[in-house]
Image (cartoon, coloured by chain):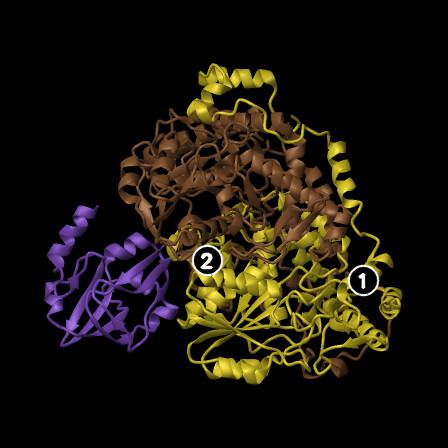
Amino acid sequence: MTNQTNPAPKTLGKVRAHQTQNESLVFEKSSPGKKAYKMPPLDVPAVDAAALLGDTCRTRFAELPELSEIEIIRHFTRLSTWNYAIDLGMYPLGSCTMKYNPRVNELVARIEGLAEAHPYRPDARAQGMLSIIAQLQRCLIEITGMDTITLQPAAGAHGEFTGILLVRAWHESQGNPRKKILIPDSAHGTNPATAAICGYQVENLKSNAEGGIDLEALRRQVDEETAALMLTNPSTIGVFESQIAEIAKILHGKGALLYMDGANMNALVGKARPGDFGVDVMHLNLHKTFSTPHGGGGPGSGPVACKAFLEPFLPTPVLAQNPDNTFRWDYDRPQSVGRVRAFYGNTGMFIRALAYILANGPDGLRQTTEDAVLNANYIRHGLEDLYELPYKTASMHEVVFSDKRQAARGVKTGDIAKRLIDYGFHPYTVSFPLIVHGALMIEPTESESLEELDLFIEAMRAIAKEVEENPELVKTAPHSTRVSRLDEVQAARKPILRWKPNQPAPDPAQAAPSSAMENLPTA
Amino acid sequence: MRYLPKSPDERKQMLAEIGAASIDDLFSVIPAEYRLTRDLDVPRQQAESEIIDYFRAAAMPNTVRFASFLGAGAYRHYRPVIIDSLVQRGEFLTSYTPYQAEITQGTLQAIFEFQTMIAELTGMDVANASMYDGSTGAAEAVMMAVRITGRHKAVVARTVHPEYREVMATYAKHQGLPSTLVEYDRETGRVDLAALEAQVTEETACVLVQSPNFFGTIEDIPAIAAIAHAKGALLIVSIAEAVSLGIVRPPLEADIVSMEAQSFGVALSYGGPYCGVIAAKEQYLRQMPGRLVGQTVDRDGYRGFVLTLSTREQHIRREKATSNICTNQALVALMATIFLTIYGKEGVRELAEHNLAKAAYAVKTFAAQPGAKLLFNGAPRFHEFVLETQEDPASLSQRLLEGKIVGGVALSRWYPELPNATLWCTTEVVSKAQIDQAAHIVTAVPVEA
Amino acid sequence: MSYPANYRYTREHEWIQLDGTIGTIGITDYAQNSLGDIVYVDVPKVGDKVTANSTFGSVESVKAVSDLYSPVTGTVTATNDALKTSPDKINEAPHDTWIIKVELADPAQFEKLLDAAAYESFIAEEQ
């Protein structure tokens, strides 16, 4: 509705501008004497800390802020409004599986008897918690088609580390730890980093013309010094390795193992099981496939499932069942690779993942996978006339385009991604995998409605048109965000990694002069 | 299924548009022998009320209304209500890693505030955006010291949390990183300085200690630092009880601090998720693992925040990365940031003083009991103490449980030389009545037949 | 930008200029252009030994890290401290901004490297 004094609001696709509140650093809002806490009275005698602690007593106290409760609520609430989130709209991030984070998960994780459980509570008094862990283990074993599992690793990369430790331990038990791990050039960066940390050399395996494993190269490179191949299936270009049986055969023929990075399990749950197609050990990402929240970058959880021959090497402790069917933690594990973290793992995430599995059941899990693959293919179909598809093989739950056509107009995948922000979407995964020039890696997940998918396709089509007609608009995007493109070069050259006292706070109403960085102290 | 936003008609419509006869067409790329033709054997789909009932039933037998004196690396502190009010906002809970800075300034600024608070508390120059937990943080800190010094040996105090040491051993095994263990003084519970001095050489990359240590005793950091630095080794101090920094002098002489911040508003949750963090002196910045948030300006000169120095990380350096870590613990770090903002400068001190007071009262009360002996009285403690009883810990634990009390952890599995010792923790949530009751039960050893 | 005729070059895009037995080493314009804005340079210590074709440090931009390969074998006699605060000098004047100076074990190694013309045809092929 327009009138003389209020011009029509500008809508671009599914978004329209709206005010967000400015907010300084919490330290800049602090004043001595403001309080947001109150301790109950001490029911024991107070102590003289200096007398009790002597020279171990603190004399200079941390300059933490002093605010009232409402200021804290406003501070963090305002900050939250500056974030994009799944609750607001689609994240097309490839291999991240940004699906709905169910709220019942948050409720059950906070049930007092679970949230307040101390990890050293005697086993006899922790049976409820142990039964939850046992149930999740059973479900994940069934889903993966493996024989056994550890939930100890804290995240996917940690799971990879644990999985490769299992590989190494097994090879050592066979008399030769072996020297190298094969990793496809399409792999996620954590794969080679993990192999190196486990003391293995990394040998790159080139992908074939279809973006899959080159069997000839594999046959040439696998020898008696190869410990394992680290494979992502479906691959990082969203394609199922249909030669998987042959790959497993080649490896097993030389006594090497097949490790699978389970990041892309969202294409397989309920439809196929890695344990059935030759995988010896794999990790899962509960924060991807199993709906636990990303929370701005963690916590995650990276269980490792494996075949029975690797069971003796699992991290300690292992959940065991007593003759009376109660559970206990078994620490008597002479061949174990050891611990990969204190306590038992990110139990809070186990609870959430199990709640997700229970909410779905077998039919829900299968339907979820089908919808995820359907959604990705729908997007592929909606964009393949405008964006280059480097590989013509069928996509599963994610589709990878290349920026080749747009690059001819001087516009790269990173620019298109930034322009997508103006249309109200989080960018897709940019420039990964490295085997695709200027990759656009798109995974919608099953959580996207037809409406949101159509809006995404429309936005990408509109941007493709802008690339033809007004490439500068795309190259200088985003235009609608609170901050424009940030100077990452300065951030890296002169790192400022903390606030320091006695600095003037910038006035949010006034942009600082471009020499602002010169006046700020370095870290 | 209620999480799936599609009607059957929409699915049909979409299939038709992409030219697929059925959804199975889209899975035909999977060889037939591997395509599942049966349902997964997992529990049937549950209603939301059934899910809640299931977890409530599992929670019931757990000892909720019992008093607990458990510590040992995981601490029960009061969690202010607004922590959950704020972290459950969808824009925090369901947001992704802040790689796209323009639309994640909320997360980035909160992490910058976290980094600042940790640096302030620990006395270090820089802190990262968090590690998985204190145990993996300690292992990563040791590997960092190896990278910095180019040396390959570690000296580790036996008073570092036993599970942290196990994790370190797992990481060190494949890095060619032998480590030696330094014993503790039987009187004080502190690292034996003479033994330490004998073990630190010019080949030592780092000395790793914990303070307050596993027994609750505060270490003599300046003396340990002098020994390490005299041979060019780095000092790493691991802190398992973050609340101690409210009243205990921070380890200013350390080169690297690896901390577990679980005490700052993160629920116990049977061992995880927790919140590790590494802080260090400025000159070691480029060898720090994990994410870092830096301040910068945008094109118009407005202040903003970005992930920075990411070239150290796995997604760029691949096999030369300083670590393979990808996730940090953003949401739990946010809980810690909010906790520290609520308590603030005065509150973290008052909170720590309350913890000290409870422990002082408990120590006095238990020491007065016949049959119970406090160990390690020769050095200051924070809020944990070691009790030695004539009764064996299993039997004592059972009697305490009957009195609705979870007593201290038995130490014998990690310290066989302390067969009848238990480690007790009194935080601000433990009451005088509970301490009195526990002490009463400890004394009332039944007469053995 | 032109490639100075009295310098020699490697296929890893380093340049070296010789003065008696002291070689001055930096990276070429082609290298700085591929890397983008340089944020940090990691250099060895004075007295360290370097070996021809082995890495002696690295150059970081925001998005990438590149190893630095020594063109010659020898001992480091100096490192450019100005790069600690102004690594961007390499972007501005790559052929005038040195990274390390090395005392060559065998000064004859210098002549065996690519000359300016050979280097320019090498990079023309790369592109």
Spot the yellow chain and give its letter: B
Residue drawn at x 67%, y 32% as measured from the top left: A359
Left or right of B247 in this view: B303: left
Residue hosting label 2: B323
Which residue occupies the foreground of this view, A489 or A240? A240
> Disc 1 to disc 2, how far (Cα)?
38 Å
Judge if badges 1 and 2 mark residues of a common chain. Answer: yes
SS category of the residue bearing label 2: loop
Which residue occupies the foreground of this view, A31 or C50? C50
Q: Hey, what amino acid is under mark 2?
A: Ser
Residue hosting label 1: B429
Q: Circle 1: is it few (<14), some (14-19), or many (20+) Cα within 10 Å?
A: some
Chain A shade in the render: brown
Position of residue A145 measured from the top left corner of the image (x, y, whole percent): 52, 34
Q: Circle 2: is it few (<14), some (14-19), or many (20+) Cα within 10 Å?
A: many
Spot the purple chain and give its letter: C
- Quadrant housing the N terminus of chain B: top right
Residue drawn at x 42%, y 45% as measured from the top left: A188
Of all chains, the one bearing label 1 is B
Of all chains, the one bearing label 2 is B
Which residue occupies the foreground of this view, C18 or A469? C18
Q: Hey, what amino acid is under mark 1?
A: Val
**CB atoms of marks 1 and 2 within 8 Å:** no
Position of residue B370 measured from the top left corner of the image (x, y, whole percent): 86, 76
- Decide if residue B98 is in sight here: no
- Location of residue B176 (image quadrant): bottom left
